[in-house]
C-alpha cells in the first residue's frame, strides 16, 4: 500500500512538479527552466543550487538540480562527461535518499546509469532503479503507468545486455512485445532481440572455433571439483586457458581466484594477460550491441594493473607494463601522467640497463604523445589561425606513388593522404559507387565502424550507401596520419567484374573526440585508356589520387 500511495503522488509528475510543494520551489524551477530554454544553462544550474540551499530536505529540489547539471553533457568533451555525471548523480542520490519513491529521480538516475559506459560504475545502480520503477508501475492504477513500463523495460534490456546477461535482456524486451503487440515499440524490441541473438551466435562460433579443452585443462577441472577453492589450482587453470587463447574462460576462473585471495599477485598477473589479449582480440561483434565494449575493456585492464602495482609496488616488470599500457591506452583513460611517473621511477632504480632503455624509449613516446595533444588542440580550437596551418604543414607526410608493376591489370589505385591525427585513430571508409549513386563495393572500412555497423554515426555517407553488406573481407585496423594506398580489382560486391563506364571513388573520415569530418570523392572512367584524377581539397584528406590502369597498362 505504501508503494501505491507514492505512485498516486508521483506517476503524474515525472516531468512536472506537484503543487503540494511550496510555491517558492516552483518559482525556482520555472525560472531555471526559462533560463535553460534561452540558452543560459549555467544560470539555470545556479538558480537550482540556490533552491537546494533553501530547501535542503526537499527531494524534488535535488532531482531538478541533477537534471539541469546533466544537460551540460550534451555538448561536453568526452573527458568532461564523467565530472558532469558525477555531480548529477550526487544530487539524484540525495533525492532518492530523501524519498526512495521519487519517480523522476529514479527515472533520471536509472536512464543515465544504463546509458553511460559500464566503466563509470553506475550500470548496476541504473538497473536497480529500473527494476524498482517496474514494481511501482505494475501496481499503479494510473493508465499512464503502462506507457511508462514500456520505456523502463526497453532501457532495462539495454542494461542487462551491457552486463552480458542476455536472457534477462531478451525477457525485458519480450515484456514490451507482450504489453503492446504490433506497436513500433514492439518492433523495436523484436529488432533488439534479433540483433542480440545474432551476436550470441557469432560469439558461440568464435568459442567453438577454439576447439575442445586440452588435457591439461580437463585434468585441472577434475582436481578443482574436489578442491573448488584452491587458489593455486584456479590460477593454474586460468593460465592453461590463456595458453589455449580461451581468454573469456581464463578471466572467469582468475576472477574467482582473486575473490578468494584478493592479494594474490600471480592471479592478477594472469588476469592482466587475459584482459590484455581480450583488448587485442576481443569480440569485435560486441560493439554492435554495446559501443562502449572495448572502452570498458581498456578501463578494466588499467584498473587491474593499478591494483596489481598497489599489491607489489616494487615489481619493476609490473610498473614497466603499467607505464607502457597507460601510454597506449586511449587518452580518456587518463593514465599518461601516471605512466610518465612510473617510467621515471624505473630509470632511477637499479633495474637492468635493458629495462631502463625500454623505460626511456616509452618516456619518449609519452612526451611525443603529450606534445601532439597541443597540436591537436590548435588545429581543433583555433582552426582558422596561422598556427593551425603550421600544424597541418608539419603533419604532411608527403606522397609515395603507387607502383603498377606489383599488380595485375586492369585495376584502379586509390592513393590518399591522411593529413591530421587526433587522440584516437579515425574511422575511415573507402568505397565505390556507380555514376548513379548505387553502391558497388567496399575497398576498406576501419574495425570499429565495420563491427558497430548501423549503431555507429561517424561515417554516415558510407553507412547509407553500403548498409554494411560486405565489410567482413575488407575490415582492417584503423589507419591514421600518413599516406595510404588501396587497390580496386574492378569487381563488385558479389565478385563479378564490373561493366565499363564511369564510377565514383569515395573516402570518408571522421576523427574523434574532436569530430573533425571530411568526405572526398572523384569519378573515374573505366575503359580502354589509362585515366588519372587528382583531388586536393580540405585538410583531413588533402590529397586523393585515383588512377585506372587498363589491361596491359604500365
Image: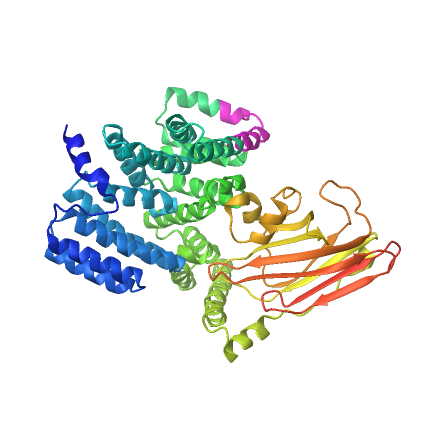
| 178 is within the stretch colored magenta | no
Residue 261 vs residue 336: left or right? left
Q: Which residues are magenta?
A: 200-218
Who is closer to the viewer here, 9 or 500? 9
For this orientation, the residue located farthest to the bottom is: 386
Report the quarter where the C terminus lies. bottom right
| 210 is within the stretch colored magenta | yes
Residue 143 vs residue 218: left or right? left
Who is closer to the viewer here, 329 or 133? 133
Residue 60 vs residue 401: left or right? left
Q: Does residue 446 appear in the picture of this structure?
A: no
The majority secondary structure of the magenta stretch comes to helix
Report the quarter where the N terminus lies. top left
Up the image or down, 515 lies above or below 120; here it is below
Residue 525 location, x and y as percent? 79, 58
Quadrant of residue 29 in the image? bottom left
- Total marks drawn? 0
State the colouring used for the structure image. rainbow
Residue 329 location, x and y as percent? 46, 54
Who is closer to the viewer here, 172 or 142? 142
Residue 264 location, x and y as percent? 35, 39
Q: Which residue corresponds to the image point at 27% horizontal and 64% vertical from the top-left?
A: 42
Q: Which residue corresponds to the image point at 39% horizontal and 51% vertical from the top-left?
A: 315
Quadrant of residue 54 in the image? bottom left
Residue 56 location, x and y as percent? 11, 53
Q: Does residue 209 appear in the picture of this structure?
A: yes
Q: Which residue corresponds to the image point at 21% horizontal and 62% vertical from the top-left?
A: 46
Residue 135 vs residue 180: left or right? left
Up the image or down, 9 lies above or below 426; here it is above
Amino acid at each position: 500500500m505504501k508503494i501505491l500511495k507514492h505512485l498516486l503522488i508521483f506517476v503524474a509528475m515525472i516531468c512536472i512538479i506537484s503543487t503540494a510543494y511550496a510555491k517558492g520551489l516552483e518559482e525556482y524551477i520555472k525560472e531555471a527552466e526559462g533560463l535553460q530554454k534561452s540558452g543560459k544553462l549555467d544560470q539555470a544550474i545556479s538558480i537550482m543550487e540556490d533552491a537546494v540551499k533553501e530547501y535542503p530536505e526537499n527531494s524534488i529540489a535535488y532531482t531538478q538540480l541533477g537534471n539541469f547539471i546533466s544537460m551540460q553533457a550534451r555538448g561536453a568533451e568526452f573527458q568532461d562527461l564523467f565530472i558532469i555525471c558525477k555531480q548529477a548523480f550526487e544530487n539524484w542520490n540525495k533525492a532518492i535518499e530523501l524519498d526512495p519513491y521519487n519517480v523522476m529521480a529514479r527515472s533520471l538516475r536509472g536512464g543515465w546509469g544504463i546509458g553511460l559506459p559500464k566503466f563509470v560504475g553506475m550500470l548496476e545502480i541504473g538497473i536497480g532503479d529500473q527494476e524498482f520503477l517496474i514494481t511501482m508501475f505494475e501496481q499503479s492504477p494510473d493508465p499512464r503507468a503502462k506507457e511508462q513500463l514500456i520505456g523502463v523495460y526497453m532501457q532495462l534490456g539495454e542494461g542487462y545486455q551491457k552486463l552480458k546477461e542476455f536472457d534477462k535482456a531478451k525477457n525485458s524486451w519480450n515484456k514490451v512485445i507482450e504489453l503492446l503487440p504490433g506497436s513500433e515499440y514492439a518492433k523495436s524490441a523484436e529488432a533488439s532481440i534479433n540483433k542480440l541473438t545474432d551476436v550470441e551466435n557469432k560469439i558461440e562460433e568464435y568459442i567453438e572455433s577454439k576447439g575442445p579443452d586440452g588435457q591439461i585443462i580437463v585434468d585441472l577441472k577434475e582436481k578443482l571439483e574436489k578442491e573448488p577453492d584452491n587458489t593455486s589450482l584456479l590460477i593454474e587453470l586460468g593460465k592453461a586457458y590463456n595458453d589455449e587463447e580461451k581468454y573469456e574462460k581464463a578471466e572467469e576462473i582468475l576472477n574467482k581466484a582473486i575473490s578468494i585471495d584478493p592479494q594474490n599477485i600471480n592471479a592478477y598477473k594472469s588476469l592482466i594477460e587475459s584482459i590484455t589479449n581480450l583488448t587485442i582480440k576481443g569480440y569485435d561483434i560486441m560493439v554492435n550491441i554495446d559501443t562502449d565494449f572495448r572502452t570498458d575493456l581498456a578501463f578494466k585492464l588499467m584498473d587491474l594493473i593499478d591494483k596489481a602495482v598497489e599489491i607489489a609496488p616494487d615489481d619493476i616488470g609490473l610498473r614497466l607494463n603499467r607505464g607502457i599500457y597507460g601510454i597506449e591506452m586511449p587518452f580518456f583513460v587518463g593514465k599518461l601522467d601516471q605512466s610518465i611517473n612510473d617510467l621515471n621511477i624505473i630509470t632511477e632504480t637499479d633495474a637492468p640497463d635493458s629495462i631502463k632503455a625500454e623505460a626511456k624509449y616509452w618516456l619518449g613516446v609519452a612526451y611525443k604523445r603529450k606534445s601532439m595533444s597541443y597540436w591537436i588542440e590548435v588545429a581543433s580550437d583555433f582552426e582558422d589561425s596561422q598556427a593551425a596551418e603550421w600544424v597541418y604543414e608539419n603533419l604532411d607526410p608527403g606522397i609515395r606513388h603507387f607502383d603498377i608493376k606489383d599488380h595485375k591489370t586492369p585495376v584502379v589505385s586509390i592513393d590518399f593522404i591522411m593529413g591530421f591525427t587526433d587522440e584516437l585513430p579515425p574511422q575511415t571508409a573507402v568505397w565505390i559507387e556507380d555514376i548513379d549513386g548505387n553502391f558497388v563495393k567496399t575497398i576498406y572500412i576501419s574495425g570499429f565502424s565495420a563491427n558497430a555497423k548501423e549503431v555507429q554515426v561517424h561515417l554516415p555517407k558510407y553507412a547509407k550507401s553500403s548498409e554494411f553488406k560486405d565489410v567482413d573481407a575488407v575490415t582492417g585496423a584503423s589507419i591514421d596520419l600518413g599516406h595510404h594506398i588501396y587497390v580496386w580489382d574492378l569487381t563488385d560486391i558479389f565478385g563479378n567484374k564490373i561493366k565499363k563506364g564511369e564510377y565514383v571513388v569515395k573516402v570518408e573520415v571522421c576523427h574523434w573526440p574532436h569530430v573533425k569530418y571530411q568526405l572526398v570523392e572523384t569519378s573515374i572512367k573505366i575503359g580502354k585508356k589509362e585515366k588519372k584524377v587528382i583531388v586536393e581539397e580540405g585538410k583531413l584528406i588533402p590529397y586523393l589520387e585515383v588512377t585506372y590502369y587498363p589491361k596491359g597498362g604500365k
